[in-house]
Image (cartoon, coloured by chain):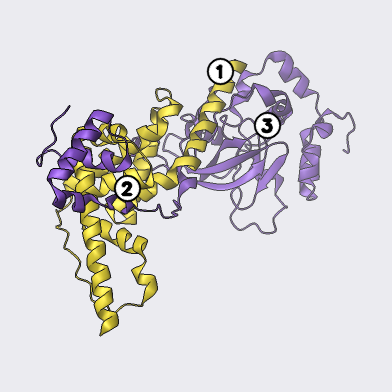
């Protein structure tokens, strides 16, 4: 009896520890890809509700991948229900405040908005969460080659946007 | 050696930049770049294009937490006297003119020393026979004997959970486990083993001054009382007369009165 009680307690505590450990990361991934806090919140709640339901079956060592895989798939389901939107390339005109706006990371972060959904998902999984290509392929149900190609193209696009912004900045300063 | 050409080089480019290509593919890729300087220029410096993870905090993490499911054996002894108090009060309360039940507090523990009181709205049915039957019906769906967490509907938007628990519930307050408590305006609760859910008393809404209570309005329901043996009931029967407790309560000393020492004492103030 005592043994069972200990196991039960541990599992609940472990679950709560998992919430503490991974909820921020998963939320960041969802917000960056879904673009609205409300949508990300919905996926968060459902993902962790599923984790709780399946806590007996999931290995703690793999729980982060499990969370991101489930969260990712729920996000894709949500995308399918949404009206599709086409990202529009940014045309920056330098009326903004100077230097801070031109920080590379800020530009790259904004560039995320102009990637395709798949590219954005892969970039955030890679750069924010540090997943390797095998893990990303498993989560997104793409082949490893597809992951690498999508990611390569995403980086090229981000660099192109970065260069474009920097060029616009230079022209603004000259004028 | 694998052949790398302009139609498949993208699948190798990142590994090349990260230095993770196997030697034969590394060699093939470098040979490819020599043949295609425009692509060499294209990938140069691409490994610098990386995002730094922004700090982001999920603001509702607490809504994801779950309560621990604890068995009750560990503190059953401490709760024993509370159980008996409840039994005694069960005999004493439920006067014939008891007003109808409007609310029932269900008790669920959150940790060893505290319980949270969740209000369940219950309306007396046409078949209602007594406060006890209403309460029994009200608490029946709550977990009993098994250490099962009561779903917290405020925090769990799961439709399944909501459907499985159709009553509206909200946390009234949290109370210490090891002493009687008075929930002003709603009920008197003598806390007991959580998941046995309920000891509740109707309290007139117009009553004021927390800490005072009309003994005639105190009610306690304790399903566990049904499980007592005859010996246990006999032992309870030797407690001080319940009228004395009423007297203590009427003097606004109810919190001091409802103690194990009170019940086990042979003294009578009457």
x%, y% of residue B265? 87, 30
Residue A4 is marked as 1
Tell me if mark 3 has few (under 14), some (14-19) or many (20+) residues whose alpha carbon lies within 10 angstroms of its own.
many
Q: CA distance from mark 1 to mark 2?
A: 40 Å
Per the image, the residue denoted by label 2 is: A124
Q: Is residue A134 left or right of residue B270?
A: left
Image position of A167 with respect to A145: above or below: below
Q: Secondary structure at mark 1?
A: helix
Query: Looking at the rendering, which quadrant does residue A89 occupy?
Result: bottom left
Tell me if mark 1 has few (under 14), some (14-19) or many (20+) residues whose alpha carbon lies within 10 angstroms of its own.
few
The chain identifier of the residue carrying mark 1 reads: A
Q: Are marks 2 and 3 in contact (CB under 8 Å)?
A: no
Q: Colour of chain A?
A: yellow
Q: Is residue A96 left or right of residue A164?
A: right
User: What chain is the purple one?
Assistant: B
Q: Is residue B94 left or right of residue A56?
A: right
């Amino acid at each position: 009896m005592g043994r069972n009680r200990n196991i039960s307690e541990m599992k609940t505590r472990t679950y709560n520890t998992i919430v503490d450990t991974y909820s921020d990361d998963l939320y960041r991934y969802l917000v960056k890809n879904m673009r609205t806090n409300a949508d990300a919140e919905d996926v968060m709640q459902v993902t962790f509700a599923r984790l709780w339901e399946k806590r007996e079956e999931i290995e703690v060592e793999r729980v982060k991948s499990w969370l991101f895989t489930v969260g990712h798939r729920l996000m894709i389901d949500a995308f399918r229900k949404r009206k599709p939107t086409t990202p529009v390339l940014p045309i920056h005109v330098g009326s903004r405040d100077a230097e801070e706006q031109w920080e590379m990371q800020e530009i790259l972060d904004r560039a995320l908005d102009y990637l395709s959904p798949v590219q954005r998902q892969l970039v955030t999984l890679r750069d924010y969460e540090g997943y390797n290509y095998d893990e990303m392929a498993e989560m997104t149900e793409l082949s490893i080659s597809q992951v690498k190609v999508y990611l390569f193209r995403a980086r090229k696009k981000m660099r192109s946007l970065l260069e474009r912004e920097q060029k616009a900045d230079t022209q603004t300063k000259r004028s | 050696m694998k052949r790398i050409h302009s139609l498949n080089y993208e699948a190798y480019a990142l590994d090349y930049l990260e230095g993770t290509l196997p030697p034969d593919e590394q060699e093939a890729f470098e040979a490819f770049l020599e043949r295609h300087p425009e692509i060499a220029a294209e990938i140069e410096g691409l490994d610098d294009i990386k995002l730094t993870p922004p700090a982001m905090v999920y603001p509702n993490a607490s809504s994801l937490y779950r309560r621990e499911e604890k068995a009750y054996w560990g503190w059953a002894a401490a709760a024993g006297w509370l159980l008996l108090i409840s039994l005694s009060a069960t005999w004493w309360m439920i006067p014939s003119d008891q007003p109808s039940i409007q609310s029932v507090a269900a008790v669920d523990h959150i940790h060893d020393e505290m319980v949270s009181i969740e209000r369940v709205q219950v309306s007396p049915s046409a078949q209602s026979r007594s406060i006890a039957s209403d309460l029994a019906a009200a608490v029946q769906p709550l977990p009993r004997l098994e250490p099962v967490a009561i779903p917290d509907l405020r925090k769990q938007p799961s439709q399944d959970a909501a459907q499985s628990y159709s009553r509206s519930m909200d946390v009234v307050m949290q109370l210490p486990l090891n002493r009687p408590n008075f929930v002003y305006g709603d009920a008197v609760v003598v806390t007991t083993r959580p998941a046995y859910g309920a000891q509740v008393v109707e309290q007139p809404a117009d009553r004021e001054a927390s800490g005072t209570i009309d003994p005639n309005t105190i009610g306690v329901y304790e399903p566990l009382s049904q499980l007592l043996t005859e010996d246990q009931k006999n032992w309870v029967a030797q407690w001080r007369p319940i009228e004395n407790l009423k007297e203590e309560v009427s003097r606004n000393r109810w919190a001091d009165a409802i103690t194990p020492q009170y019940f086990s004492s042979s003294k009578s103030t009457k």
